[in-house]
Structures are given as C-alpha cells and as structure tokens.
Image (cartoon, helix red, strand yellow):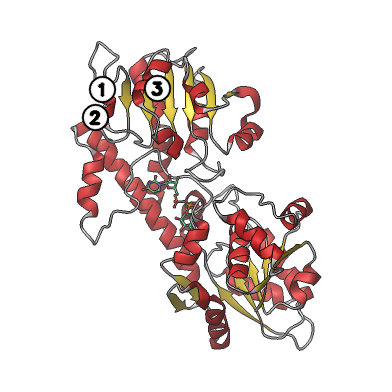
Amino acid sequence: MNISVIGVGYVGLVTGTCLAEIGHHVTCLDIDQGKIKQLNQGLSPIYEPGLEELLQHNLSKQTLSFTSSYQAACKEAEVIIIAVGTPSNTDGSADLSAIKNAAEKIGAYVRHTDTIVVTKSTVPVGTNKKIKAWVSGNLKQNVQVMIASNPEFLREGSAIHDTFNGDRIVLGTDDSKAASKLQEMLKPFRVPILHTSIESAEMIKYSSNAFLATKISFINEIANLCEKLGANVEDVAKGMGMDQRIGHQFLNAGIGYGGSCFPKDTNALVQMAGNLHHKFDLLESVIHVNAKQQVKLVEFAKKHMKEIKGKTAGILGLSFKPNTDDIREAASIEIINALLKAGVRVTVYDPVSQDKVKLLLGDSVSYAEDCFAAIEDQEMLFIATEWEEFKVLRLSTIAKLMKTPNVFDGRNCFSLHEAKKTTMNYYSIGRPAVMNHCTEKERV
Ligand code: UDX
C-alpha cells in the first residue's frame, strides 16, 4: 500500500518506518528540510533504540523515502497519516495550527478519490470532523476523502517494540470502507484492533494517558504517606499490584511523570472539560500532585541539610525517563531550577540528553563528562532518571567519591539494604530514610 506520513517527529518517524518494515511503500514528509536531508542519509534526528537500523534497512530497500514536497507525498498516497505536533497553548489547550495547515495542504494536493486521511496526532475530541472540513475545503472537484482516527500509544524508548507488540490498535472511523482498508494495512503488526466511532477513538487516547498519570500520582501520594508512617511504598505497590484488578504496572513511585504526552494530555483534557463547563477535579489534583512531586527532593534537601545555599550538587539523569534524549517536562529541569534558585552550584550528567540541556540551561550549570565526574566532591547527589548505568553503580563507591555523601534518589534505584552498609545519608521516595552520615538520626 502507498502510505504518506505528514510530520517526522517522534510519532511520525516511528510509524512511517515501522509501516515500511511490514512491507508498505512509505513517504514521510516534513517542512524541516534539514531533518529530511539527515533522514535521507539514514540518520535519525531522535534517539530511539532500534530506529536507525530500521530506517537504514528500509531506505536501502527503497520502501521508505523522505520529502518536503506535499505534491510528492500526496500524489500516489492511498492513506495519508497526519502526525504533526499539537503543543500546548498557554491555557493548556492543544494548538491545532500545524494540523490545520497539514489538512489544508493535503486537500490541495490529494488526487486519488477515496484516499483515507488518518490522524495519529493527539487531538481534542471533535477535531477529526474539523480535519475533514479543512481537507475538503481544498479538494479538486470529484475527489473525496475518508477520515479516520488512529491514536498512538507508543512509549518513548520502546516505541519500536511497542509498535510490534502493542496491546491494541484503535481505529475510529464512521466509514466501513476506510475501516476495512486500514485493518488490512495494519494486519501484519498482529495487534488486536478495536473499531470505534471517531470521537470515541479520540477520547480513548486522552483517557488512557489521564488514567496512567492518575495511577502515578496516586502511588506518589501513597509514597508520601509511607514516608510519614514508616511503610515502604515498594512493598505496598507490590501488594496492591497482585490484585489483578489493579495490576503491577505504573505503580513505581518517584519524582513524577514528565515527557511529551502525560503533562500535555492531562492539561488538554482538563481544558476540554472546562470548555463544556465541567470541572475535572480528579485530574486537576493529579496534575497538582505531580508538580509538587517533581521538586520533592529539593524540599528533602532543604529540610535535612538546613542550609543548601552555596553548596554543590550533582544531578544524575536529565531525560524524563531512561532510553530517550527527550527532556520535555522532565523532573530534572525542575530540580535544577529549584537548586539554582536556592544558590546551589550544579553539575549535571546524562548519557544522551546533555546537548539538549545545554541549549536550555547554557552555562548556568556545569556538564560532567561521565557519571563519576558528576558525583566527585559533591555535597549532594540527586538521581532524576533511572538509567541502567546509574543502577549498576555501587553506593559505597558513590559515598567514597562525594565530599559529604547525601544522596537523594528520585527513582528508587538502590536497595535500602545496600544503603545501610554505606557511610551515606540516603533519601528515596516512599521508603524510610537511611541516615548513616548524620549523627543526629532525624527522619525527613
Ligand atoms: C506515554 C504513554 O505510556 C504512551 O502510551 C503514550 O502514547 C505516550 O505517553 P511516554 O511518555 O513515552 O509514553 O512514557 P511512559 O513510559 O508512559 O512514562 C511517562 C512518565 O511517567 C515518565 O516520566 C516515567 O518516569 C513516569 N512513570 C511511569 C512513573 O513515574 N512511574 C511509573 O510507574 C511509570
């Protein structure tokens, strides 16, 4: 099948490459010519495990190509997938200007009647109807398009794996011909397909992300209580998760969720509800809990160290989660800003996202060449992302390298048993503090 993908951001690039991998002819379009040039050379502009290999494989098979020309992308396409960004407006609502622009361009260049325009971008409920109007407004006489919603559920860092092993594909369309053609297109992924109306498909995406975000804020609030009550949130989560109605996933307490989806989608859903005069109290609390959780470790440090002004801190991990270079809405940035505001000198390290942080924070912080350089001689150490290379470090080595071993672990990377065998003060999330360095055995 001839497929075009509009937008080679994270979603578009992974989707286009995987569709080529299952045998379709895919043309990906982006208005950023620099990106297109890079991609045509087989270089991925984003860090995603396995993506570059698949990209190069399909470029060499000529099943995948990249262009900036709408004419080239739309001419032969049977299916056109819109995967452009929908960033947040200042009020939390989704900015649809890139979607509108793409839809109008598609309308102007599409030539095949019965081309299916599929929206993969996360858009407020009701947007696909607008997309149909934007496309149709520019169509040539006698050309008609069908519209479908196919939200993505890919996790950054495991997006290729998720594409081939997803729990479900959601296809929302009111057109049975479009439904069966898209089902045929997606069949090789061997993932169960749920057919719904367009509105329900749009809503499934928002409610899934809002629910997962709720699970995270819920366990983080339980963690906050565990700290006060002397319980261990990891055991609590394990005990809860053994109930199959609850399940084990997304019950890892930490310094909150970040990334390109959860913060944006939860805010957009609150905004959508507000537009309908419905106050989404539960989700507003989820967002509020997350904002507090992101800077919780700095509050720990202030409480324990009494005075942090003038002290030094190392930060391990900058991306919003491991195996990605994405720093959007990352807790690390909130922590760094709070520390800088408090007069702390900060040195950061991340295996892949350091360059992105440099663009954002410039020389307000120092950049370490490796994790050891970020630990050495520090008075405080904050772990913001659970990269594997941090988890294999020995706490005793960390304690020896630091000037005063105060470790604030936002991702519970180490066992309390190991922490107890060191000379450090070790604070984690939802677990009792381990105070070896301090003479005063106060609890945080
Ligand atoms: C998410 C959804 O999982 C995916 O289905 C959707 O389409 C896009 O958004 P992603 O943002 O890539 O994917 O990351 P995810 O693995 O879901 O993690 C999001 C955030 O939640 C991360 O900051 C992570 O550290 C945090 N998280 C996740 C927790 O704090 N605890 C958990 O138990 C799970």
Is 431 above or below relative to 32?
A: above
Q: Which residue is mark 2?
A: 417
Callout 3: CB less than 8 Å from ligand 1? no
In the rendered structure, the answer to whether residue 142 lies left or right of residue 320 reads right
- Residue at 59% from the left image edge and 34% from the top image edge: 354
In the rendered structure, the answer to whether residue 338 lies left or right of residue 396 reads right
Q: Mark 2 is on which residue type?
A: His
Q: Is residue 130 visible?
A: yes
Is 185 above or below relative to 32?
A: below
Q: Mark 1 is on which residue type?
A: Lys
First along the sequence among labels 3 and 2:
3
Q: Which residue is mark 1?
A: 421
First along the sequence among labels 3 and 1:
3
Q: Which residue is mark 3?
A: 398
Query: Callout 3 environment at 10 Å: few (<14), some (14 to 19), or many (20+)?
Result: many
Is 296 above or below relative to 149?
A: above
Residue closest to the eye, 192 or 351 = 351
Query: Callout 1 environment at 10 Å: few (<14), some (14 to 19), or many (20+)?
Result: few
Between marks 1 and 2, how big is the CA–CA gap?
Answer: 7 Å
- Residue at 74% from the left image edge and 76% from the top image edge: 137
- Residue at 66% from the left image edge and 52% from the top image edge: 44
Instruction: Find numbered disc 3 in the image and state the secondary structure of the residue it sits on.
Output: helix
Residue closest to the eye, 250 or 264 = 250
